[in-house]
Image (cartoon, rainbow, N blue to C red):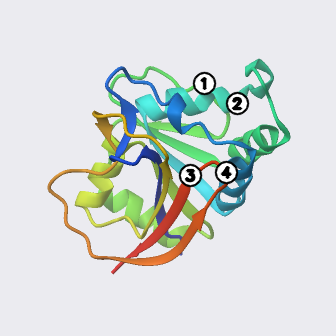
Amino acid sequence: MGDLIYTALQSLDGYVADEEGGFGWATPDDEVHAFVNDLTRAIGTHLYGRRMYEVMSAWERPEELSGMTDAMRDFAAIWRAADKVVYSRTLEAVSTERTRLERVFDADAVRELKESSEHDLAIGGPDLAASAFGDRLVDELQLFVAPAIVGGGTASLPDGVRLDLELVEERRFDSGMAYLRYRTR
């Protein structure tokens, strides 16, 4: 049985994107990227909403990304090897390998996927994650807190959901980024 893990790179004030939609202030350096890579190796399936999928699909063609580092190349290989499920009512087709399109988020189907999976699953994007939080599907949160306050934008965590959490791991990086790993109780 796999756990469902929500991972977010966020500002100190809790946003994954600022009011203009930018998130460059959370770009991981090689140290953080290598750490993220090690976490991502355990993921067998990524669950995405349309917007997060569109951002992440760039990893399908890493040769088109500028400033490639070894850590970035490693991440691209890890990402391409995993299965992806995209939830979207508006996306006409997916553009990446090992990817299927679902029109609606079905909590029971995700529960079945968790129960039948030999690997952990990741859920990306705060809008889709809000559904999973609301349905009590999230087992773990992996939050990377960037040393930035952006003052508004897209919140990393949903309103209206209460969860009691247990801090199980923390790490500080030279860049000032902090990693906090919580299990749901």
Residues at marks 4 and 3 touching, judged by CB atoms closer than 8 Å: yes
- Name the residue type under label 4: Val
Q: Residues within 10 Å of mark 4 (few under 14, many from 20)?
A: many
**Residue wearing tag 3:** 177
* Depth check, front residue: 126 or 122: 126
Out of 176 and 51, give the one closest to the viewer.
176
Q: Secondary structure at mark 3?
A: loop
**Mark 1 in CB contact with mark 2 (< 8 angstroms):** yes
| Image quadrant containing the C terminus | bottom left
- Mark number for residue 60? 2
What's the distance in space between the residues labelled 1 and 4, CA to CA? 28 Å
- Sequence order check, earlier mark of 1 and 2: 2
Question: Dot 2, crowdedness within 10 Å: few (<14), some or many (≥20)?
Answer: some
Can residue 55 be seen by looking at this rendering? yes
x, y (%) of residue 8? 46, 49
Residue 174 on image: x %, y %: 67, 54
List x then y, in percent, for residue 63: 81, 23
The kind of residue tagged 3 is: Met
Q: Is residue 166 above or below residue 160?
A: below
Q: CA distance from mark 3 to mark 2?
A: 26 Å
Q: Residue at coordinates 67% horizontally, 51% vertically from top-left? A: 32
Which element is circle 4 on? helix
- Above or below residue 82? Residue 134 is below
Quickly name the residue at label 1.
95
